[in-house]
Image (tube, helix red, strand yellow):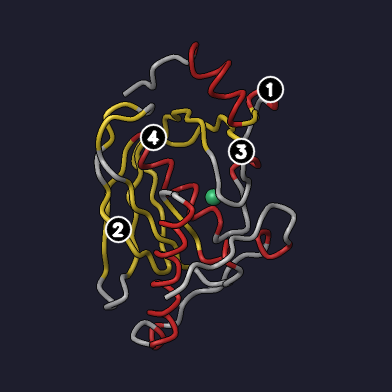
Amino acid sequence: MAVRKIIRMGHPALRRPALDVARDDLGSEALHRLVADMIDTLHDYGGIGLAAPQINEGIRLAIVEVPGGPTRHGELAEQPLAVCVNPRIEVLDPVTEGHWEGCLSVPGLRGYVERPRGIRVSYVNLRGEEQRITAHGFLATVFQHEFDHLDGKLYIDHIDDPHRLVFEEEYARYVLPIEEPTPK
Ligand code: NI
């Protein structure tokens, strides 16, 4: 296991659609090693989600792990580590909800993005088992953000108002104190 380097905005690999993982590869040592590296990398960088293209591996694989508890997004429901292979999203509630997003591939910035607030996520895990997760609010945003990486998209592509793309320090100083509480 190893911490891998996360590539940053501007690297062309972040803009390439990733390829499906073949069913036969699910049990392979190489894929398990890659997932172990992604978990190490996620923990080392202190993130809540990471997609394989962010470490320059162009396959449809992403991990999400959200610790529960009180945060600036309200009381967060815990999402235990989900290793999502070939994920798909179905929108359950198209009403959008906005969150300030960040990305390990766009370090130092925060941007306000609106996305559908209720989704169902389907994927296979490393054992080849079909999994389903229903996600609302901030967790729905996290999954949509990570799976966007598999299509070569970044959260900045969804920012409607460029005034709401700011540096983290300025976010903490000017935005956070006046931010409306996130609607449920
Ligand atoms: Ni990201």
The quarter of the image holding the C terminus is top left
Q: Which residue is mark 3?
A: 158
SS for dot 4 = strand
Give the number of the disc on residue 163.
Answer: 1
Report helix, strand or loop for mark 3: helix
Badge 2 vs badge 3, beta-carbon distance below 8 Å: no
Amino acid type for the residue under numbered disc 3: His
x and y percentages locating residue 27 in the rendered image: 33, 86
Mark 4 or mark 2: which comes first in sequence? 2
- From the viewer's perspective, is 93 left or right of 173? left
Which residue does the numbered mark 2 point to in the structure image? 81
Left or right position of 16 against 96: right
**Disc with the residue nearer the chain's start (4 vs 3):** 4
Q: State which mark lies toward you, 2 or 3.
A: 2
Residue 129 found in image quarter: bottom left
For badge 1, the amino acid type reads His
**Gap in angstroms between the C-alphas marked 2 and 1:** 34 Å
- Name the residue type under label 4: Arg
- Whether 2 is drawn above or below 111: the answer is below
Q: Earlier in the sequence, mark 2 or mark 3?
A: 2
- Please name the amino acid that badge 2 sits on: Leu
Q: Nearer the viewer, mark 1 or mark 3?
A: 1
State yes or no: Cβ of the residue under disc 3 lies below 8 Å from any atom of ligand 1: no
Which one is closest to the eye, mark 4 or mark 2?
2
**Mark pair 2, 3: CA separation:** 26 Å
